Image (cartoon, grey):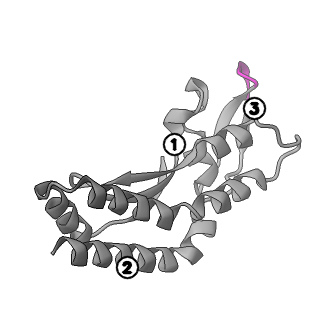
Amino acid sequence: MLRLRTTGEDLRQVSARLRRIDNPEIKKRFRKELRAVATPFVPLVRSSIRSIPSTRPYTADGLRGRMSKATRVEVRTVGRDAGVAIRVDGRKMPSNMKALPKGMEGTKRWRHPVFGNREFWVTQQPHPYFFRVVRPAGVAGRRAAARVVSSITRDVS
């Protein structure tokens, strides 16, 4: 599971205040605005996944297509892990491919059987696709999330 998070004590405090008040409209707006901050990152990550070099053409059923489909935004406004995350979720991959998003992003080579044949294994180089795309835009995303938190804080106070 790969994530980029915007978290902080301010977000936790706003979340706690929202739980205490009984205004579903503000809670809904808070989640919607946080999701809107992170949503522009998803097409960037998906495009980066599709551009991973391969000897085969891109297909929706291939590794790159499945990784692209597993990319999503997650907004949590409760608990210790309150925040916004862009995830390439291995849990959304087929059972034999759950570790592949992390392996492709990794810094070291990884091995896998050729088409599931456990007698023939190949070593594959990682092809970083996530952080090289998200990091440059991360500063703007954190600023936007801070604006959302401050806006909701003003409304709640």
Q: CA distance from mark 2 to mark 3?
A: 39 Å
Q: Position of residue 144 (x, y in %)?
A: 44, 77
The amino acid sitting under disc 1 is: Asp
The range drawn in magenta is 115-121
- Type of the residue with mark 3: Asp
Give the quadrant of the C terminus: bottom left
* SS category of the residue bearing label 1: loop
**137 relative position to 17: left or right:** right
Task: Looking at the picture, tell me which residue is in the foreground, 119 or 41.
Answer: 41
Residue 60 location, x and y as percent?
76, 36
Above or below 99: residue 11: below
x%, y% of residue 96?
A: 59, 26
User: Quick check: 102 left or right of 143?
Assistant: right
Q: Residue at label 3?
A: 61
* Depicted 126 relative to depicted 113: above or below: below
* Residue 79 horizontal side relative to residue 131, left or right: left
In front of the other: 23 or 68: 23
Question: How many other residues sit within 10 Å of disc 1, few (<14), some (14-19) or many (≥20)?
Answer: many
Sequence-wise first label, 2 or 1 = 1
**Residue position marked by numbered label 2 in the rendering:** 147
Q: Nearer the viewer, mark 2 or mark 1?
A: 2
| Most foreground residue, 130 or 115 | 130
Residue with the mark numbered 1: 89
